[in-house]
Amino acid sequence: MCSIEKNVYTKNFLDTVILRIDFLEFISNEIIEDVELRKVIIMSFPRLGKTQLMKYNNVNIQFNPLAPADVPTTNQDIINGLQKEYFSADGNNSIAISNKFIVCQIKEYSGFDKLMQSIQLILREIYHKQINLTSVRTGIRYINLFRSGEIKLQKNLFVQEVAASLEIKPNVETEPIQSIRSMHTTEYKAADGVNLSFKYGMYNPDYPNVLKNNSFTLDFDCVFVEAISNPEVVIQHINKGHELIRYLFEQTITDALRKLMRNE
């Protein structure tokens, strides 16, 4: 991977940062309700949200070689589970812990290092409580939203390929056809089974209604699909995903936008 010197910005246009980890095994309800785990979580997410009862279908398929045409027999078990939500003090950030996944959603972003301080402690505690645990999918996503009311959108803020999808003028009511959304997707493959999806274009929060403003999005989603039984490797993947997204973000913007983000 090419390297770019890290830029320090005083302003960003992040709308949401999402971190998700999916597990192969079923995390027990006792662990989700564990007092020690809760102590670690409330260090960053002190407000307890709702607790949801979850039901998981566990289907077992067995083949009997003595049966005609190897007709399989199926057994279906329903497992009762939990999902607990926690929020930051201001309510803008949240984390959900369930039997099969962890989802962290950040609306008030204070930097990657601060995010990782929280996630590392929580993830290590869960792995400590349940030794035989395998993550099968790790994803980190950064959604940048340049709203028309917050920035004067100009094509010179982005590289040519991305800027070509920017519509400066909103729809005019007299036009015979009107756009409702204009999004483009480019997918990348990196080493170690990493998939990186980059979506950009005219975001429409009122979709499928007519696009009325020229808010623009850069949406980066990095996913690792690999069975991992070591929390430190999961943490490494999250760090790598962040670096890949940071690199691609820098490849899509120009010095004009960098100056705005540095308040120069």
Image (cartoon, rainbow, N blue to C red):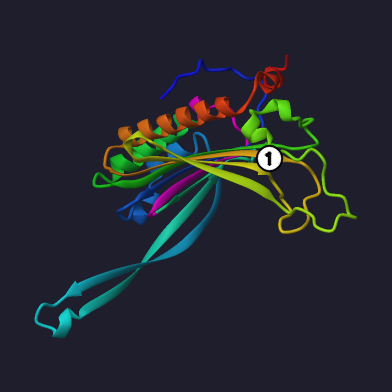
Image quarter where the C terminus lies is top right
Front in this rendered view, residue 263 or 173: 173
Image quarter (top left, top right, bottom left or bottom right) of the N terminus: top left
Q: Name the residue type under label 1.
A: Ser
Q: Quadrant of residue 223?
A: top left
Q: Residue furthest left?
A: 66
Name the residue: 21% across, 78% down.
Answer: 72
Residue 28 position, x and y percent, is 33, 55
- Horizontally, is 206 left or right of 12 in the view? right
Q: Is residue 159 left or right of residue 231?
A: right
From where the camera sits, is residue 33 visible? no
Up-down relation of residue 71 to residue 51 (above or below):
below
Nearer the observer, 12 or 221:
221
Magenta stretch in the rendered image: 99-114
Q: Residue at x 43, y 37 (%)?
A: 40
Q: Quadrant of residue 157?
A: top right
| Left or right of 1, for residue 44 | right
Residue 158 position, x and y percent, is 66, 28
Query: Magenta stretch containing residue 70, yes or no?
Result: no
Q: Is residue 77 visible?
A: yes
- State the residue in front, 164 or 200: 164
Residue bearing mark 1? 165
Residue at 35% over, 53% down? 30
Identity of the residue furthest to the right in this view? 174
* Residue 259 percent location from the top left of the image: 69, 17
- As drawn, the residue found furthest toward the bottom would be 68
Q: Crowding at label 1, few (<14), some or many (≥20) Cα neighbours within 10 Å?
A: some
Count the marks. 1
Label 1 element class: loop
When the figure is inspected, residue 1 is found, relative to residue 169, above or below; the finding is above
